[in-house]
Amino acid sequence: MLIERIVLKDFRNYEYQEIFPNKGINIIYGKNAQGKTNILESVFLCSTARSHRTNKDADLIRTLQQGYSVKIEGKRDDEPFSIEINCTKISSRLNKKVIKVNDITLSKTGQLMGVLNSVMFSPEDLTVIKEGPSERRRFLDILISQINTSYFYSLQEYNRIIKQKNALLKRVYETGKNSDLIDVYNIKQAKTGAKIIKERAVFTEQINKKAGHNHFDIANRAEELEIKYSCDIPDYSGEESDFYKSLDKIKDKEIKIQSTIIGPHRDDIEILLNGLNIRDYGSQGQQRSAILSLKFAEMQIIKEKTNKQPVLLLDDALSELDLLRKRKLLNKIDTKQTFITCTEKRRYMTLDDSISFFFVNKGSVKSI
Ligand SMILES: Nc1ncnc2c1ncn2[C@@H]1O[C@H](COP(=O)(O)OP(=O)(O)OP(=O)(O)O)[C@@H](O)[C@H]1O
Ligand SMILES: [Mg+2]
């Protein structure tokens, strides 16, 4: 996976910017709030169709402009590829996003998955540990979607089913009619939901093995990191029929609450350190090491499953480490193309010969 050119138009604080990264390590440096993370964000966007820090496309449009455009050109197994995302404001609430791969407009966002694989390490990652279950589900979903397009479609379908079912539950609650129709949705929910849970459980187990190993390496202590998928469906053996039965049992409750209360949209991943919940018992350093271990696991899994090195995006992730640790970590990463943001380039000057430096100042990038 190699990015050769990035073009930003009215994206965040960039009016127009072209960047030509090298195939090794690219250091993007500059003072705070100049646009370093915005560059990494644009790469992540072309990889996953979403930003790593906002769900609102409008945030990505340069202030007072009507839309943004991001284009990435590169090579995949020596074959050239291009990804272009154009987003236009239609109204104050609505934006139209068009994604092109090799100049052909995609009919479904899912078709973008796997074209450009990337892994982002950012300060926001700690939310996976510190925040609620939705952040952990998001972490899993982004990882699996990059590898398995059909998972991405199942997820989209499942979200649609839940939205429609919730609207129906509300109507049934208000009118007392059509409660039989809920069964139709429960069947659909159980079918698609079971697929999602199965994939997530498989991936969680793979992450568990790899992250545990990584954690030992990074923390270099006798700490056991354990990751478990936690499904809230009672008596669930993995069978679609169990899921349906559980939904049937709580049908009246769901009508009363007007909401779907069990299923993969409510599941979580438990992250345990020496058997205890890391969120409540882990120190800052332990939490930071655990998240790095998880992220490394993500990278290793993408590499194994796709046979391609994902592009690495390290947003301020190494700034607290000394040179030796940085080197150890970068060796461990063993990747081809890496983008690192930092405030001081000095720290990286002696790291390697194959480094390119980009100086960012007020939404303008200069290759140094
Ligand atoms: N939609 C937007 N339009 C214009 N400017 C924006 C937009 N969104 C963010 N910005 C500006 O982009 C800058 C922040 O960019 P970014 O997050 O890339 O900073 P950074 O260089 O990574 O800083 P730090 O070192 O603090 O992480 C801020 O000046 C912010 O005001
Ligand atoms: Mg930043």
Image: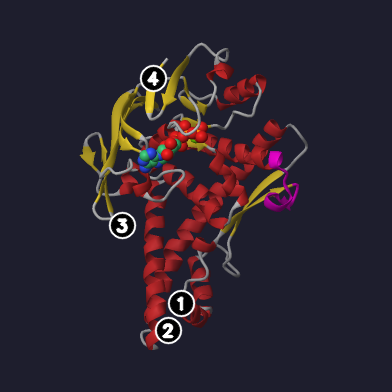
Classify 10 Å Cα crowding around label 1: few (below 14), some (14-19), many (20 and above): many
Query: In the image, residue 144 lies at what x, y percent?
Result: 47, 46
Residue 206: quadrant of the picture = top right
Query: In the image, residue 161 lies at what x, y percent?
Result: 38, 66
> In the rendering, which numbered label is found on residue 258?
1
Q: Nearer the viewer, mark 4 or mark 1?
A: 4
CA distance separating discs 4 and 3: 35 Å
Is residue 280 found inside the magenta-colored segment of the image?
yes
Q: Residue at x 33, y 37 (%)?
A: 11
- Name the amino acid, label 1: Gln
Query: In the image, residue 48 lies at what x, y percent?
Result: 40, 42
Task: Say if mark 1 contacts mark 2, CB within 8 Å.
Answer: yes
* Disc with the residue nearer the chain's start (1 vs 3): 3
Query: In the image, residue 232 lies at what x, y percent?
Result: 58, 65
Which residue carries the number 3 mark? 93
Classify 10 Å Cα crowding around label 2: few (below 14), some (14-19), many (20 and above): some
Is residue 279 found inside the magenta-colored segment of the image?
yes
* Disc with the residue nearer the chain's start (4 vs 2): 2
**Observer-nearest residue: 363 or 40?**
363
Classify 10 Å Cα crowding around label 4: few (below 14), some (14-19), many (20 and above): few
Say which element carries label 2. Answer: helix
Q: Is mark 3 within 8 Å of ligand 1?
A: no
CA distance separating discs 2 and 3: 30 Å
> In the rendering, which numbered label is found on residue 173?
2
Which residue carries the number 4 mark? 366
Which residue is outermost to the left?
104
Say which element carries label 1. Answer: loop
Q: The C terminus appears in which quarter of the rendering?
A: top left
